[in-house]
Amino acid sequence: MQQRQLTISSIIDYAAQVFGDAEVISRTIEGPIHRYTYRDCARRARQFAHTLDRLGLKPGDRVGGASWNHYRYLETFYGVTGIGAILHTINPRLFTEQLAYTVNHAEDRFIIADAACLPIFEACRDLLKGVEAYIVLTDAAAMPNTGLQNVYCYDEILQGADEQFPWREVDEWTGSALCYTSGTTGDPKGVLYSHRSCVLNAYAFNTPNGVGVGFKDALMPVVPFFHGNGWGIPFAGPMAGANLVLPGCDMEMGKLHELIVGEDVTVALAVPTVWLSMLEHLRQTGSNLGRLAKIVTGGAAPPRAMISEYESDYGVTISHAWGMTETSAATTYSHPPNGVSEKAALDIRATQGRPVYGSEIRVVDDADKPIVPEFGTPGEIRARGYWVASDYYKTPDKPAVDANGWLITGDIGLIGSDGNLRLTDRTKDVIKSGGEWISSIDLENAAAGHPDIVEAAVIAVPHERWQERPFLIVVRRQGSDVTAGDVLTWLSERVAKWWLPEDAVFINEIPHTGTGKIDKVALRKQFAVGKSGFATGET
Ligand code: AMP
């Protein structure tokens, strides 16, 4: 067979040649809808590659990108990787210090940002050590005023660049994209995707056991491209020749709905919180979802009732996916087999699903021994595959895999005899709210800094809209009359607003495990949480 490297540039070349008229439709940061084709996208991506080359970017260098989903950001996925450099997708929702940490750790030479994300860099410019220049993803007319130094306007620097600029030949194992995960405690950790892993992951995404996308589809990633390498969509969409509908920064449900219906979206992807809000919007407005046939959701478990309502009231099937930044996002997908009852199908849809070819999962016991798949035996989930991380970027002291080379996921669950994964818990002491991580330990430390608090613990409690919210449990200093309100006010001055716990309760003593850690299992039991709210422990 021919020796051909699996490179990202081959995807946009294919899209331009074979599905050159397929459209990329974007809501721009400025508001108006922009439309062009994959042919245009490929042309401008080459121009951007040429521009970066002219700016002195070398193979292996990192470029940070902070942007919502729109066509200019899409182009950078190809422009940066097309000269063998690495696109570090930055989550603009990170705290300033975390964001600066990732830019410095990645040693980003340039920052690409759209106008909505630029202020983040203005806020932390003094912390950024090696950034040489900023490229704003806009045109001259919409160029924002900024106090940053060495700022280029993207559309302006593209002018005159070579539309035929040749892609640099790279080995398929070369790094292409870098995404930091803040899903555990401590500093965020980087996951470096190779060209090969991105191409293979996009292939799997497009197969029917994955998302199942072809050229007749219009694919809408509501999930931002800064989450888990954009769930593979910047590559899978062009590879499928599907229209791409990119919602920009406006996450208002009416705006998303307008795009879904107006652009004949057939497949849309987002965390469950988005789909819960969309359901509310549909109920209130009495509208339908046009041609939308499939929703893929993951990042957190969607409520069963939501899956059922989309199917029965809107004719939209929900495929539930599981994955992590470390597994190039989704790597298992739930699809019920033919010929089962409605209830059985719903049961399967509510699981995290089966791995798509190219990745494997297994459950291990405390001694790292695989547990034979059978119901009722949860253990820790481990994963391996063509797009699963082997280590963290420049972080040798934090291994990603176990002694057998399987990724340590920090998720607890079981694999049923039907092959479907069912998550039951996680070992990671974190809270995932609306698809974004909240560190319980950071919250505990911030609360424990209050002069009247002896000890603080934070657990996750279920929440109808955000899936999980933090719940604070504190021990007061003897004789103090500090109130829950006082503690929350104290916290509000120290953490982001969306991190603020739903409530704080006082107890006399926080339970500890044999090794002196806060016993969260005991706390969760003690504060048995019902659907209607929290809280029953002694206060
Ligand atoms: P991230 O690396 O930020 O994408 O987060 C990955 C983590 O999100 C996983 O390890 C799980 O804890 C959680 N997660 C992802 N998908 C699901 C799902 N379908 N159901 C429940 N939890 C999920």
Image (cartoon, rainbow, N blue to C red):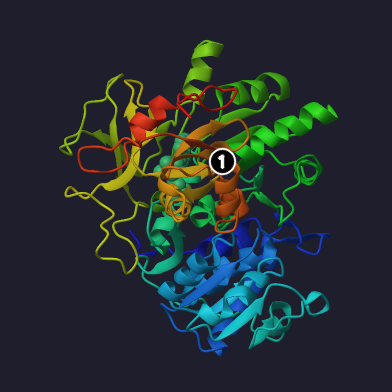
Residue ID at (63%, 88%): 150
415 relative to 42 in the view: left or right: left
Which residue is more in the foreground, 289 or 350?
350
Could one spot residue 211 in this view of the protein? no
Farthest-out residue, top:
341
Which residue is more in the foreground, 416 or 74?
416
Residue 45: horizontal and vertical position, in percent? 61, 72
**Number of numbered callouts drawn:** 1
Residue ID at (39%, 57%): 197
Which residue is more in the foreground, 120 or 179?
120
Residue 243: horizontal and vertical position, in percent? 68, 50
Could one spot residue 157 in this view of the protein? yes
Q: Quadrant of the N terminus?
A: bottom left
Q: Secondary structure at mark 1?
A: helix
31 relative to 151 in the view: left or right: right
- Does residue 165 lie above or below 511 as drawn? below
User: Is the residue marked 1 within 8 Å of ligand 1, measured from its CB?
Assistant: no
Residues packed near mark 1 inside 10 Å, few (<14), some (14 to 19) or many (20 plus): some
Residue ID at (65%, 58%): 69
Q: Which residue is mark 1?
A: 484
Farthest-out residue, front:
479
Residue 427: horizontal and vertical position, in percent? 33, 40
Q: Quadrant of residue 310?
A: top right
Question: Quarter of the picture for ligand 1?
Answer: top left
Residue 509: horizontal and vertical position, in percent? 35, 36
Disc 1 marks which amino acid?
Ala
Residue ID at (56%, 49%): 499
Which residue is more in the foreground, 316 or 144?
144
Q: Quadrant of residue 412?
A: top left
